[in-house]
Amino acid sequence: LKVKASGILRVTSGTAVIGNGTTITIDSGGTFIASGTAEVKSSIPGTDRFNFNVNGTFNANGLTLRSMETAGLNLLNGNAIQQLRDVKFYNVKAVNGAAHLSVTGTALAIDCPGCFFDAGPAAPPNGPFNVKATDTDGGNNVFMRFEDRGDATSGAGADEAYDSDDDANDNGI
């Protein structure tokens, strides 16, 4: 599934079921919009996996993602994130270095309230991270603020120990 420049993929309710090994790609200039009770999952959650790569604009205010490959939701142009709110992440592939959410950018400051991360079968570095953020220009100016309101609200994988960023500090993303 590919959304080209000027195209829009909008999911506002219901469930989009993605086949095993399928890649959803939002090209530069394309847009992904999700809201409400939208869900994107693999055809057999927990067994089948899909890739979700976004080079264009990402705007989500209510989305559930289940059973993605190792990069999870892979936002390759983090500077084009308009909203990342109330997104729930479940069952990313449980391998060393995997992440529910991978973000690459040069300058980003965004609040991400209401997100939920399950913990996976093992804690990092052997299990999946919640967020893996990379600042590609070395400017130390990629900031993503998530809430940790306890396991029931934010998920057992929302803890600080599950973050992966490219600085030496254990101070969040």
Image (cartoon, rainbow, N blue to C red):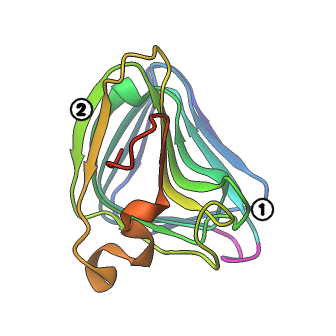
State how many labels appear. 2
Which of these two is toward me, 58 or 142?
142
Q: Position of residue 133 (x, y in %)?
A: 46, 39
Q: What residue is disc 2 on?
A: 109
Which residue type carries mark 1?
Asn
Q: Position of residue 73 (x, y in %)?
A: 53, 49
Vertical comparison of 122 with 39: above or below: below
Name the main secondary structure of what is drawn in magenta.
loop
Helix, strand or loop at disc 1? loop
Helix, strand or loop at disc 2? strand
Residue 121 lies within the magenta run? no
**Which of the 4 image quarters holds residue 167?**
top left
How packed is label 2: few (under 14 Cα within 10 Å), some, or many (20 or more)?
Answer: few
Q: Which residues are magenta?
A: 42-47
The outermost residue toward the front is 168
Which residue type carries mark 2?
Ala
Q: Residue visible at 23% across and 62% down?
A: 147
Q: Position of residue 171 (x, y in %)?
A: 32, 48
Looking at the rendered image, the quarter that the N terminus falls into is top right
Q: What residue is disc 1 on?
A: 20
Q: Residue visible at 72% across and 63% down?
A: 49
Q: Which mark is residue 117?
A: none
Horizontally, residue 108 falls left or right of residue 16, namely: left
Q: Residue visible at 63% across and 60% down?
A: 125
Which of the two labelled residues, at mark 2 and mark 1, occupies the earlier sequence position? 1
Separation of marks 2 and 1 at Cα, in angstroms? 34 Å
Looking at the rendered image, the quarter that the C terminus falls into is top left
Q: Position of residue 161 (x, y in %)?
A: 45, 63
Q: Nearer the viewer, mark 2 or mark 1?
A: 2
